[in-house]
Image: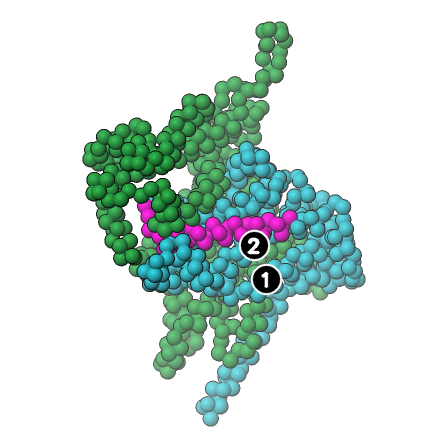
Amino acid sequence: MSTMSMKARKKASNTLVYIILTVLGIIWLFPIIWIVLTSFRAEGTANVPYFIPKTYTIQNYVKLFTSDIFNFKRWFLNTFIVATGSCLLSTFINVSVAYVMSRLRFRLRRTYMNVALVLGMFPGFMSMIAIYYVLKAFGLTQSLVALILVYSAGAATTFYIAKGFFDTISREIDEAARIDGANNAQVFTKIILPLSKPILVYTALQAFISPWMDFIMAKMIMGDNYDKYTVAIGLWYMTEKENIEQYFTTFAAGSVCIAIPITILFIWLQKYYVSGVTGGSIK
Amino acid sequence: MSQIAINKKGKTKKMKSRENIVTIFKNGDLFTRLSFLIMGLGNIARKQFVKGLIYLGCEIGFIYFLATVGIEKLQGLITLGTQTQGWVLDETLGIEVLSQGDNSMLFLLYGVCTLVAVAVFLVVYISNIYSAKHVQDLADQNVHIPTFKEDLKDLMDNKFHLTLMTIPLLMVTIFTVLPLIYMVLIAFTNYDKDHQPPGALFHWVGLANFKDMLFSASSFSHTFFPVLGWTLIWAVFATVTCYFGGIVLAILINKEGIKLKKMWRTIFVITMAVPQFITLLVVRQMLMDYGPLNGELIGWGIISEYIPFLTKPMYARIVVIIVNFWLGVPYTMLITSSILMNIPKELYEAAQIDGASPIKAFIKITMPYVFFVTAPYLITQFIGNINNFNVIYFLTKGEPLATDYYFAGKTDLLVTWLYKLTVNYKDYSRASVIGIAVFVISVVISLVTFNLTSSAKSEEDFQ
């Protein structure tokens, strides 16, 4: 009798949880579903007093890829180049610094780690003006290389997560390899890196995704050179006051086009993401 | 092999801890002492010709740099320019010509670059002294002195950190440290929209900007404190709501007997994967005065007039916290999920036998456990929210504007205000002061909380 009531109670509470999760799920997905619907909306203006479009069209996507004013294809390609470049460079920097700080001991190691912490406490874009002038001195403003460099430079101070990961790898492995005659470079490339797939994937994923999302630095560096825009500034520009009435549905179409690949990538690599975030900081 | 390496390392470490530049000068022989003046001499004397010549080359290059441009740039850093752009009478031509004048911005930038160059040289200089002493010690003990080739080979082994750190250090110096020094220095000048080079010069003003922000009756000061207050309120609410919301959601999904856990997780994670500026701009559009949400609510007869979600200060502030909740909960959920799975089941069973209700078990078991593990994460989140540019800028742009504020709106955080002052108003010196204020706040909060939490254990303990 009592087990029966226990079971019934459990069932009831699980049903309640399902209901809550369903409601929350709808709330959480709603804006995303709405943007997909809007991207197919035929009524062109920005503000309509209803959620479900009255008529549907694929013209928004056609406009997105054929418009002369907003060269979305170009922006997409630009962002892809920057993302790939900064993914390679910043993964290299991030993992190198993390490994050095975690495994090797030398003078100024602590100093460097403390300086990196302190640098991280300044608001990220406080120095954007100065970065702009530095790039200008190199003749690099309004170029994709500049973006790659700026994004990757940040990696040298945000190595703490990867360092936490390396800290968890047993040092006995290094010692054994060194007894076998391997030097530090070989320990790094042949022993530690193959063991670090989760953190490599996590770091690379972060670095690849951030150019698709960053707006501040990209806008600062590219200024009014539309041909060098990344999708983030381009799409934002479509929602500025002077454009939004005409281009909001096109913006929605563009958003869908970049959200789909990133979402797939993200969900596919989700487990690395979790182990990356939790592996280092939480143990 | 490794044993030797460790021993050697231990020994050198011990020696170095006793050595500093002064003791080296006292104990060094002639060549080591001369290395203080002529860099690389110690190395050359011990037949490390290439290394010695590299040091010497650095010294000559640096002196040449100082003599030709360096000194001038450092002087420029002090004056920040004296010649204002304008019309000057050219005596030979007898007419007025436009004189370019000095550019304070460039003076400051080049001055900072020179300072960084001096700092880099000092590092090389000190390494030269240690190197001279090191080869002297090796020679005294009749140990083999490594050739240049062996030194290079060591870059892959005992000096591997130098190899790996070169590129990162170079990039950090150029793109992070140098710009940051430049911006911090600007806080001590009057570089604002009235002092824009090349048309006008700006000057050092000492702590005037800080006084203006903290102790004056100016509109800048009258904006700073309310914006600071709202920034802190926002950070507390944004962090706490997302934290507990995320934990509750993780508990719901991980509840025993709930099927399709992965699907539920994925549903919420999608909001994390879509770029933030997109979701935020979309939500902004939804919440517009004449947008779809108001339209539907009016259509269903729930309200008769639109709700000013983003245009009334109080509503806008609540809305940004709610939308941030929507954005931030999946992240905490993802992180706490794995922690929840690690809590020993026996704890809950014991609690159940003792007759504890699920809520009591949550307060007494789940929360302390999760809190213990996630304390550092919580601090990071709090600092992150103080600097949370995206949510505010894309959702409200800091608006509704307040007329009595200095170019800020009612939902502006310090960082969005900083951004607007920089980009829209070229008010660099004030923006820079705000940046330093954010820095100080972040440092204080981190230090205090880090020392309070039990997670402040030595990193070596846990390796």
Q: Are marks 1 and 2 in contact (CB under 8 Å)?
A: yes
Residue A263: % across, % down: 61, 62
Task: Report the amino acid beneath label 2.
Answer: Phe
Task: Residue A221: give x, y in percent of width and height.
Answer: 59, 40
* Chain on which label 2 sits: A
Q: Could you say which chain is coloured green in the image?
A: B
Which residue in the structure is indicated by mark 2?
A: A208
- Give SS at disc 1: helix
Q: Chain of mark 1?
A: A
Q: Main secondary structure of the magenta part?
A: helix
Residue A99 is one of the magenta-drawn residues: yes
Q: Secondary structure at mark 2?
A: helix
Q: Is residue A207 visible?
A: yes
**Image colour assigned to chain A:** cyan
Q: Is residue B457 left or right of residue B199?
A: left
Q: Which residues are magenta?
A: A78-107
* Residue B233 visible (yes or no): no
Numbered circle sitting on residue A128: none
Q: Which residue is mark 1?
A: A265
